[in-house]
Image (cartoon, coloured by chain):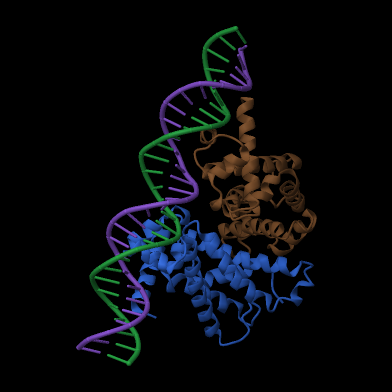
Chain colours: A brown, B blue, C green, D purple
Amino acid sequence: MDRRQQKTRDAIFSAFSELLSQNSFNKITVQQIIDAANVGRTTFYAHFETKDDLLREMCIEIFDHVFSSALQAKNTHDFSLSAEKPSALITHILYHLRDNRKNILGILSCESVELFLGYFRQYLDKSLALKLADSCALSGVPQDFLINHISGSFVNMVRWWTENGLAKTPEELAEYFLAVIPPIA
Amino acid sequence: MDRRQQKTRDAIFSAFSELLSQNSFNKITVQQIIDAANVGRTTFYAHFETKDDLLREMCIEIFDHVFSSALQAKNTHDFSLSAEKPSALITHILYHLRDNRKNILGILSCESVELFLGYFRQYLDKSLALKLADSCALSGVPQDFLINHISGSFVNMVRWWTENGLAKTPEELAEYFLAVIPPIA
DNA sequence: TTGATACGGAACACTTTGTTCCCGAATTCA
DNA sequence: TGAATTCGGGAACAAAGTGTTCCGTATCAA
């Protein structure tokens, strides 16, 4: 990819992330973004169709990175939380959310949480559905209800975490999480 | 209150609710609302400062209604889920959400879920915090984490419910809910 | 070096917002 | 019932934001 394109894209992502940490998504204008990123109006619209498109692409880039890292680190094709060490995957994802990307905190500390968490859930749902089929018959709860509950709880935990200034460690959080969700067979 | 005021307010609420069931909050314009409600632009701004204000007031009205009904029905001052029959309160709230107000379904079936659920959580958090103080020491989980988890799970369940067309009964949902959250002392 | 491509400034039409002025109609109160 | 008050609504307005177009300049890849 052309260096100019990449530079512009990064500048816009960075400026957008910075703005997101201060204002809510819907209050941010394209003008603010291009001012902060120091790019022309024409350039912005050459890269992204709309403001919504920008947020969408940014979320996708972030999650592709976080989850591919998490999966590599486990060196396994079993991505579900029902693996031998569930806390390992959870902890690993939480570390990425905390350290590797300032962008994530920017997004999570504003009202655009919903869209962000929507993408988050898409990945979590995928991971969870794999190995959960049989563990539901016992509890008498429909599988999709359980999947929704667990991935929703994870997302909810991350939200709580950031709203409290990342006070807890990823290990502590993983422990809490496994303590409050129903045990998976 | 003046009949004219009440009529206008109802017309706007109704039109807004109808629009919310089809479009997302941010895509709806004030022009659409006043067209659908058949009121003048001046009138709208005489009642509500902004579109956000409209959503805010509508949520407040709904929750005041739902929760006051739920509390009356229980005939008790103990509003927490840790009462003798936790499923009774849960079921009762769910019935109200399903039957009494079309508005709620309108709001929940679009992207404004977040704001709506925000108010929802305020009420749930209040109800939960009352009788949860001691039941945390055992599990080793901080109280605010647990409160966040439980109220978040409730809200998440309602979202799942509506996205699946209210297929389950309130009784079934209450059963599922109590099955997946950690037992409260 | 050259051809292609990305950047950026300025101006544009368009949409939406929130306000103001004013008059007619409904309501309340005496 | 009649007068004073309050509400509704039409029209026009400035201001802000959106997304596009045109065109000259700067940068890149080969």
**Depth check: A174 or A133 in front?**
A174
Quarter of the image that includes the N terminus of chain A = top right
Residue A122: percent from the left, percent from the top?
A: 58, 48
Q: Is residue A165 left or right of residue A43?
A: right
Which quadrant of the figure has residue B138?
bottom right
Quarter of the image that includes the C terminus of chain A = bottom right
- The residue sitting at 54% across, 68% down in the picture is B173
Which quadrant of the figure has residue B22?
bottom left
- The residue sitting at 70% across, 56% down in the picture is A162
* Total labels drawn: 0
Q: Is residue B36 left or right of residue C18?
A: left
Instruction: Say whether residue A80 is visible.
Output: no
Instruction: Say whether residue A81 is visible.
Output: yes
**Depth check: A69 or A8 in front?**
A8
Position of B116 relative to A34 (above/below): below
Residue A153: percent from the left, percent from the top?
A: 65, 59
Position of A172 relative to A93 (above/below): below
**Depth check: B23 or A184 in front?**
B23
Q: Is residue B162 left or right of residue A3?
A: left
Residue B9: percent from the left, percent from the top?
A: 39, 71
Position of B39 relative to A121 (above/below): below
Residue B150: percent from the left, percent from the top?
A: 65, 68
Position of D29 relative to A91 (above/below): above
Q: Is residue D9 left or right of residue B154?
A: left
